[in-house]
Image (cartoon, rainbow, N blue to C red):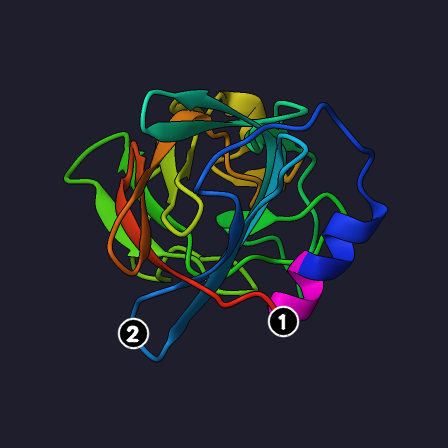
Amino acid sequence: MRTLLLAAALIAAPAAAQDSPLVGEYSLAEGPDVGGGLLIRGDGRFQYMLAAGALDERAEGRWEARGDTICLTTDPKPVSPTMEKGALIEVEGSIPTLLVTWPNGRGIPGVDFTIGFDRGDPIEDYTQTDGWTMPDDDNRIPRWVELREAIYDITAPRFELTEADGGKLRAIIVPNDIGVVDFDGACLEKTDRGATLRRVEGEMRFVKLDPE
C-alpha cells in the first residue's frame, strides 16, 4: 500500500505548495483484515486507498486548510455506477428469470433482490453468477424487480416488467468510476498518533508514518 501511494505521488502533476502539519503519509489504524493508506502532499494533492474484504476504495484530488483541519475533495469528480435494463441472454442453454451482469455479460453474484408477482407475496433472495430462476412449481408471473448491490451501495429504481419481457429481467451494472470515493469536503483532523478522517460514512483513524 505504501509503495503504491508513493508511486502515485511521483507521477502526479505538481500544484501550488501548501503548509500544514497534516502533510505526510498515513496508514489506516484498523483491524487485521482491513488495509489502507492516505498521502497528504505539500503541493495540495492527496491519494487514498482502502482494501476491506470485497470492498476496494481509492481516491485522489486536492485538499485545502480549514482552521486546524484540512478537507479533501476528489478531483476529478467520479461518476457513480448505475444499473440499467439489458437484452436477455442465455446462461447454460436457458434464460434465467433474473440475471445481473457486467456490460460484458459476466454474471454478478450476491446482488440482493425483491421480486413481485401478479399475485401472492414477493420473494427476497440474492443472485448467483448464473442468475436466479423461478422454482418449477411456482407459476406466478413476475411484475417488478428491485435490486441492491450492497458492497458499493448500487441501487436502481424499481424495474417494471411488461408483457414483452415475458417475466424475465437482465440488469446490467455499468461500473463507471466504481470504487472511487467522492470526497466532497471530508475533513482530516490531527490526533496524537496521526489523524482522523471524518466522512459521511463515519470516521477513519490513521497513524502517521515516520518519513524515511
The structure residue drawn at horizontal position 64% and vertical position 40%, both measured from the top left corner, is 175
Along the viewing direction, whichever of 52 and 70 lies nearer the viewer: 70
Quadrant location of residue 206?
bottom left
Residue closer to the observer: 71 or 88: 71
Q: Amino acid at mark 1?
A: Glu
Residue at the location (56% across, 46% down)?
179
Side of 41 where 36 appears, left or right: left
Q: Quadrant of the C terminus?
A: bottom right
Q: Amino acid at mark 2?
A: Gly
Residue at left 62%, top 42%?
A: 41
How packed mark 1 is, by other alpha carbons closer than 10 Å (few <14, some 14-19, many 20 or more), is few
Residue at which label 1 appears: 212
Q: Is residue 16 left or right of residue 95?
A: right
> Helix, strand or loop at disc 2?
loop
- How far across and how far down the image is residue 167, in percent? 47, 36
- Secondary structure under badge 1? loop
Q: Is residue 133 magenta?
A: no
Where residue 51 appears, as percent x and y from the top left, is: 49, 64
Magenta residues: mostly which secondary structure?
helix
What is the C-alpha distance between the residues marked 2 and 1?
25 Å
Query: Is residue 208 placed above or below 53 in the rendered structure?
Result: above
Residue 86 percent location from the top left of the image? 66, 33
Mark 2 crowdedness (10 Å alpha carbons): few <14, some 14-19, many ≥20:
few
Q: Which numbered tag is attached to residue 31?
A: 2
In the rendered structure, the answer to whether residue 138 lies left or right of residue 62 reads left
Q: Which residues are magenta?
A: 1-5
